[in-house]
Amino acid sequence: MLAEAEAGSARREGAAPPIIRLSGVGKTFDNGTEALRGVDLSVARGEFLSLLGPSGCGKSTILRLVSGLDVPTAGTITWSGATERVGEEQEVGFVFQEPTLMPWARVFDNVYLPLRLKGISRKAAKDGIMDALESVGLEDFAHAFPRELSGGMKMRVSIARALATDPEVLLMDEPFAALDEITRFKLNDDLLRLWAEREWTVIFVTHSVFESVYLSTRIAVMTGRPGRIDQQVFVDEPSPRSSAYRTSPQYAETARNTSAALSSAMAAR
Ligand code: ADP
């Protein structure tokens, strides 16, 4: 299976130039914890890449390094194409596991926050904010407070906030882990629709084999800590994917292969 994955990698890397490349990336925290060692990963423009691995293997750390929130202690991260700088604010949107909304501010102002931080006036930002809210189906809730919203709606606000900056790359750290299954499935479909419409590059962190198979064009399977990429699984199912895919033999087979890759990565050192 690894040979097959490698052949697929060469084919795809030829098709689209990488937008982000991690070479030999390592991260050891000040307290001595070695979270990552020797991470090699290229992300092509337009990919939906999932990082799959056990808790604590360094998935969130990779997102933080890619976003520029933190710096590697070994190796390099390079951006190509239009993006010259790691973490350039307008190029990267970050969605965290918790929606991290300001409870005292209305939905509109929560979505406005990153634009306000960039010095854009409320008036100039208004149309973009309303577009972002419409994209996630919350245009009627612009004046609501977070406490009036369900967990799924709060996560939609968080996604709208990332959308408002019109990022080229969207980093998502287990954004749906705390949601019930029905809401999660709905948000999975909404995310795939937005990904297709906006032509984003997405790096999505998850520890769910099933979620990664449903969403991704490629799954990078990580070892336990110190984490590195052990295997890759390419998901050839074309878009748009729908609930019919969840019950298809192809889905079951890819999930089986991905589970096997995860077990072998967890056994690897
Ligand atoms: P994952 O997202 O795969 O669950 P993380 O990237 O959050 O893993 O963490 C990887 C490892 O690094 C864990 O052992 C975690 O405890 C450790 N870690 C993360 N951030 C810090 C930090 N700021 N200081 C020390 N250790 C950290």
Image: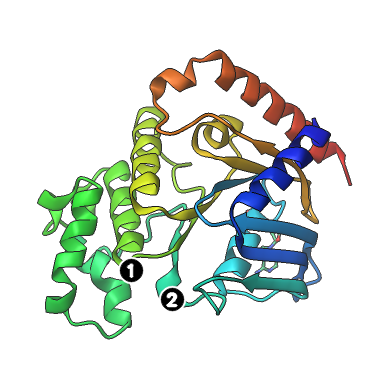
* Badge 2 element: helix
Tell me where residue 51 appears, x and y as whole percent.
63, 48
Residue type at mark 2: give it: Glu
Give me the residue at 56% from left, 32% from top.
213
Between 188 and 32, the one lying in front of the other is 188
The residue carrying mark 2 has its beta carbon less than 8 Å from ligand 1 = no
- For disc 1, the neighbor class at 10 Å (few under 14, some 14 to 19, many from 20) is many
Tell me where residue 234 appears, x and y as whole percent.
64, 36
* Numbered mark located on residue 193 in the image: none
Against 37, is 8 above or below?
above
* Badge 1 element: loop
- For disc 2, the neighbor class at 10 Å (few under 14, some 14 to 19, many from 20) is some
Ligand 1, what quadrant? bottom right
Instruction: Residue under label 2, please give it.
Output: 89
Tell me where residue 263 appears, x and y as whole percent.
78, 32
Between 90 and 266, the one lying in front of the other is 90
Against 85, is 241 above or below?
above
Give me the residue at 87% from left, 41% from top.
268
Distance Cα–Cα, label 1 vs label 2: 8 Å
Dividing the picture into quadrants, the one containing residue 176 is top left
Instruction: Residue under label 1, please give it.
Output: 165
Q: Which quadrant of the figure contains the N terminus?
A: top right
Colouring scheme, one of rainbow, by chain, secondary structure, one colour: rainbow
Give me the residue at 63% from left, 69% from top.
65
Against 27, is 234 above or below?
above
- Mark 1 and mark 2 residues within 8 Å of each other at the beta carbon: yes
Residue 109 is left or right of residue 140, and the answer is right
